Amino acid sequence: MDLKRGLFRLLAVSAIGAGWPATGADPAVATPGRRVVVVSFDGAGGLELGRRLGAGFFSPDGFARAAREGEAASRLAIVTPSLTAVSHVALATGAPPGRTGIVGNTFHLAGTALRERRRGFDVDPETETLWEAAARQGKRVVSMGFPGTSQRSARSRTAMSLHYNEVFPKATFWKGSAAGTPFTDVSSLPADVVSFSPAKRFDLENLPFLLLDSTDDGETNYDTLVVLGADGSVRARARTGEWFSLSERREQGAEPGVLFGRWSKVLTLSRDLSAVALYLGDVFHTEASPPEFRRAIEARAGFWPGLPDANLLRGADPDVSSFLEQARRLTRFFLDAFEVADQSADWDLLLAYIPILDTCNHYLLLTDLANPSYSKERAAKAAAGIDDAWRSADEAASRFLKFREKGDVFLVSDHGFRAMNRSISPAAILVSAGLLKVVPGAGGRLETAPDSPLDFIWASGGTGFVVVNRVGLPGGVVPEDEADAVVSKAAALLRETRDDRGERVFAVVANRTEAVALGVSHPNMGDLILIAAGPRHLRGGLPASGDLAALGPPEIPGQHGYGADPALDGLYLHMGDGVAHASLGVVRELDVARLVAARLGIAPPGQTP
């Protein structure tokens, strides 16, 4: 078909690489405007997807359907570094980080003071985005957590949006027992509450909790927790292993009646109250615009459930089940919100985000036998958790693919994952060599001195930057005629840094000129880009005073944010009218914006806003 031939022509012209398409390059074959859904499955590796497809892991209606009926790439070649903010901006602009200026999840914005940082999720790129190009050409856009659409600036706003709340939960883990906690007897109970052993009460965070025995068997058998409201009515009821939600409507700014809530779980409730454990979740609310969209999401999906809590995975016996239940709940929330948007035909482009694979791979990719936390038992439990996350992602893909009856569906991702066994502190290396000057900071930790010759910025994952404190920066101290020597000294030191096995710990130590070949050369990368080698990730910040160990255990078992690596590439699947089944080989991330624009029937994003 013409579309298929045109697509292959585009891919042949594009080739695999990091360069940005030249102005005026032919876009994908134009079509009459269609409605388009683009879903990013954060952390979904293309090669891993292919392995699971080959093993028959998926249902017939999700990823397998897209691969069977639509266009499927073997992998989506991701820009360097393979970080969430960087990669999503590349997806949305068709430009590498050397053009967008979004060089990391965190970076030093060129021209600012040495210790200042910016989040790549919140900085507007220096090139036009897909949502801007669509709006400029009369298309209405919905964003649902898609990185880059933070709604914090005019350029990051869309006509309708569901905001991705990145706040990590500050939950309460509470443990008590009849012996150690002053449970009090309750003389009167609400009309619909019965206990066949004396009801017990305790208070936590101004909430009254009751412990009840619901079985009339003549034995002490506490099995139910009840949460009371201020008026004494029952707000929630749960047994061991069950989640419960507590919600209420509050005023939020000028908005009355905004739904707030917290998800909590009874972790343990022994029949004799010798052990009681409760997870009391953090309070969140849904942030969406316009207000009527938020209210519709609240009616369908409730309140924002919060991110999965990594604290559940700490200790000798990680609670993988509860962590996965939180991850699945967030996925269902996004799908319910999509149902709300889908019921409205008042949009042309919808950008969706499903983060479950990113979250679970970060904390559960325990496959490296050299990881100090590795054991067969823990690894088996973690692997089962990742399988569960892939199944949840597949269920989400199945739901999004139902939109195929109304328009096009693109399933993409921003990167895959690499298992870790070590971590590296570039800051500690630089401090030990006298290149990074430190002073005592809060909590006994060191911090970069304002007059330090340079600083290290952790971009996230395996990537970081070194910035020289040139006199041109506010408070800068290094004269311009000495700056190159400082850069060269730091680069030589880092290139020669080896671990206890004699292996270099950095795969890349590149100055701005050398970084051109990586597609990441930009003033925002500072003077050097560092990329860790092998199964190592970088650590940000500075250590506690006196602890300047350069190498240590990994902080989490799975990471991304490296250079070109097929195992870290993403996925690309596309279904739509007139799109025949085709195996595309490798597709570039930098081509996605043009391919989507072609199906929308618009010109692709331009070089400048």
Image: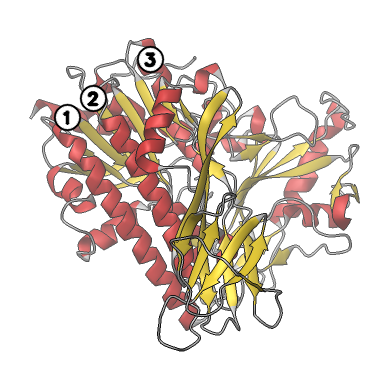
Whether pointer 2 and pointer 3 mark residues with C-beta atoms closer than 8 Å, the reply is no
Q: Nearer the viewer, residue 422 or 412?
A: 412
Q: Where is residue 145? Give x, y as percent.
A: 45, 36
Q: Residue at x 70, y 51 (%)?
A: 540
User: Residue 35, which numbered label?
Assistant: 2
User: Residue 135, which numbered label?
Assistant: 3
Q: Residue at x 41, y 53 (%)?
A: 329
From the image, tell me which residue sits under label 1: 406
Q: Secondary structure at mark 3?
A: helix
Q: Secondary structure at mark 2?
A: loop
Compared with 511, 27 (above or below) is: above
Of mark 3 and mark 1, the one earlier in the sequence is 3
Crowdedness near tag 3: few (<14), some (14–19) or many (≥20) residues, C-alpha within 10 Å = some
Whether pointer 1 and pointer 2 mark residues with C-beta atoms closer than 8 Å, the reply is yes
> Amino acid type of disc 3?
Ala
Q: Where is residue 12? Give x, y as percent.
A: 26, 33
Q: Is residue 76 left or right of residue 409?
A: right
Q: Is residue 592 left or right of residue 379?
A: left
Of mark 1 and mark 2, the one earlier in the sequence is 2
Q: CA distance from mark 1 to mark 2?
A: 7 Å
